[in-house]
Image (cartoon, rainbow, N blue to C red):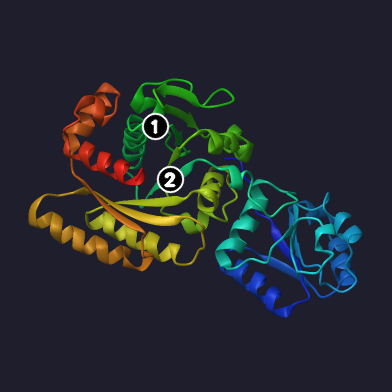
Amino acid sequence: MAEIELPVIVTAIANSDLEGFVSGSLFTQGWSVVYRALDLSGLERYLTSDCATLANTVLIYSPDLPNISPAAIDAWHGKLRNVIGFSSHSDDDSAYFGVHPIPKDVTELASVVRGSVRTPLLRSGVRPLESKRRAHVIAVGGATTAAGCTSLAINLAMELSVLGKSVLLLDGDFRRPSIAALLGVRKLDTGESWKVIAPNLSAGEITQERVRILDQYMEPALLEFDYIIIDLGTIEDLGFSLTDRRWGACLNHWSCDNSNEMWFLGRADILGIYRMDLLVKQFSQIAINSAVSVLMNMKAPGRKGSDEEGLFLTSIAPLKPARIYTLPRDPRSLQKAHLERCTLIEIDDRSALRKAIAKIAVELTH
């Protein structure tokens, strides 16, 4: 599988508090800080000592570094993987390359640096089209395999479209893409854009080729659609994927930085609760921008379901999720929908699972 090489970090920040925050925070997020320059001459000596690694180096600097100048920074921006500046709030900051406001917290810092892997050499600290953005983005990931992410993503997208919202459904499960097969549509992985598959509903598949232009692919979607629903598949190794070199991890990066919500989906059985517990422990060590919600899938009826729900809720408590949803066990309706290659509303609009997902869609739109 093709790799996206993880860059190393070089800092050039005079303010010890800011430098310590940047270096320490990035280290906890899995990045490698290989050099900390105290002045411009030290920075230049280090960068010129190993030219072979320049293309894989991200320079994080502040205009307060002794002897620094806009010309000195501009001289490096075409040779390094990226150059990121954090403003010292002086009057001359605007003359420097790639200046961002000083991050408010670890989440904001991690977002800027992760973004440098996907889209290097941006001159602005503002996310593309943030002020004009229309779409509400929900990324759905499972704590384990067979958690039900694809079925949820498909049916949530359909329910939102039935409510009159324009929706883009994206298959981001690079290991096991299955939306096209489950809906009986072809060529979601080809062409320059997405494909209309129903009124108000379009779909696409994130491929290796599209990952290379991921921001360019997503920017028009953020302007065109009311909702973007992304099926990430299994994200049990989310903590590792945020510093993963493989192309398949790029959509995880993008989702953590750009989605409005991350939905963690888990099964209410012994193995499902165990996997969710592992995901929660990993998640406590990373920083993302998105709000987190949790869905317990395949809840059994009666006392057994209540006992499972109690254990599940205990496992997710450290996440402090914005929302908690419960989806009933409804294998008959799902199997029928899969066989007919359609959604639940088309096959049985009175099924328990369809009603539960429809209720979630209504809540989202109000």
Q: Residue at x 71, y 48 (%)?
A: 120
Instruction: Out of 143 and 1, give the one closest to the viewer.
Output: 143
Task: In the displayed orientation, state which residue is furthest to the bottom.
Answer: 16
Q: Residue at x 84, y 60 (%)?
A: 50
Q: Residue at x 27, y 52 (%)?
A: 325
Disc nearest the viewer among 1 and 2: 2
Residue 235 image position (x, y, % from top left)? 42, 50
Label 1: how many residues lie within 10 Å, few (<14), some (14-19) or many (20+)? Answer: some
So how many labels did they put on this image?
A: 2
Q: Is residue 360 visible?
A: yes
Q: Nearer the viewer, residue 292 or 365?
A: 365
x 49%, y 59%: residue? 239
Q: Which mark is residue 178?
A: 1
Q: Residues within 10 Å of mark 2 (few under 14, many from 20)?
A: many
The answer to whether residue 5 shows anywhere in this view is no
Which residue, given by chain and number where applicable, does mark 2 sit on?
Answer: 138
Q: Is residue 360 left or right of residue 27?
A: left
Q: Is residue 185 left or right of residue 42?
A: left
Assign a secondary structure to mark 2: strand
In the rendered view, tell whether residue 143 sits above or below residue 26: above
- Image quarter in which the N terminus is found: top right
Residue 357, image x, y percentages = 27, 41
Horizontal and vertical percent position of residue 49: 87, 63
Instruction: Name, please, the residue furthest toward the front.
Output: 366
Give amino acid for label 2.
Ile
> Residue flagged by tag 1: what amino acid is it?
Ser
